[in-house]
Image (tube, rainbow, N blue to C red):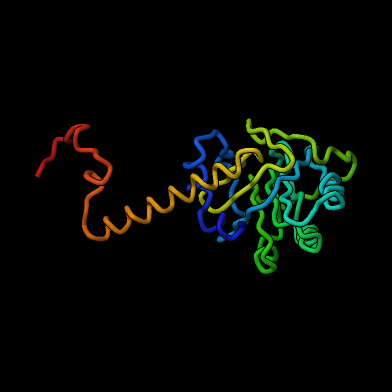
Amino acid sequence: MTSELLEMGAATLFEASGLSCDLDPAFRPAWAGARLAGWALPVQAAAGDNLPLHWALEEAEPGDVLVVDAGGAPFGYWGEVLAVAAQARGVVGLVIDGGVRDTDRMRAIGFPAFSTSVAIRGTGKEWPGTVGSPVIMRGRVVNRGDLVVADEDGIVVLPSASVDDVVAAARRRAAKEDAYMARLRDGELTLDLYGLRPLGRPVVTS
């Protein structure tokens, strides 16, 4: 299913879901083209302290995405070392409200990371935090086992109980959009495709 989710993309899944499931647009890919789909492993960290991220790798299972609330503090919580260790554990990506670094190296090894900053400032290791308990990512609650899909358009977090229904709806939406695209390529206007003409015409000046 992962390849299908990546092909659908975060925007299609969000629109199809009918849910408030998108993360704040402040979360951006650490490198161009990064994308991920996997199951959330929530992590709570303190500002400037990445010890919980090290512990999270012990708890992680293949297919997991680490979803880390670090309060948005601009520190380099994650870089090449943790990315290599994560890949060896089968972790498929990282979403962190905080900073990452070594972005070129992560791109080179194909590890997708989404963060609210890129920062080189180092971190301490004092508070072990929490791993697996729900976290709040800028107003959005993320639970263990939620489905996370992220690409350059944004990030969606789908509750595990709704995944099957959302994926089915997204398939229907994708098929409908494919049909729309064919009509647009044949020259049909969006005004007619979406039935927008009754909403009123603008004042057009030649």
Above or below, 35 relative to 46: below
Please, which residue is most extreme toward the left here?
A: 206
Q: Residue at x 90, y 41 (%)?
A: 126
Q: Nearer the viewer, residue 150 or 72?
A: 150
- In x, y percent, where is residue 134? 75, 34
Q: Residue at x 73, y 52 (%)?
A: 64
Please, which residue is most extreme toward the bottom here?
A: 108
Residue 26 in the figure: left or right of residue 99:
left
Q: Nearer the viewer, residue 8 or 204?
A: 8
- In x, y percent, where is residue 140? 63, 33
Determine the image quadrant of residue 62: bottom right
Q: Nearer the viewer, residue 117 or 157?
A: 157
- In x, y percent, where is residue 159? 64, 38
Above or below, 14 relative to 198: below
| Quarter containing the N terminus | bottom right
Number of numbered discs overlaid on the protein picture: 0
Residue 176 in the figure: left or right of residue 33:
left
- In x, y percent, where is residue 116? 63, 44
Residue 164 in the figure: left or right of residue 176:
right
Q: Residue at x 30, y 59 (%)?
A: 182
Q: Residue at x 56, y 54 (%)?
A: 5
| Quarter containing the C terminus | top left
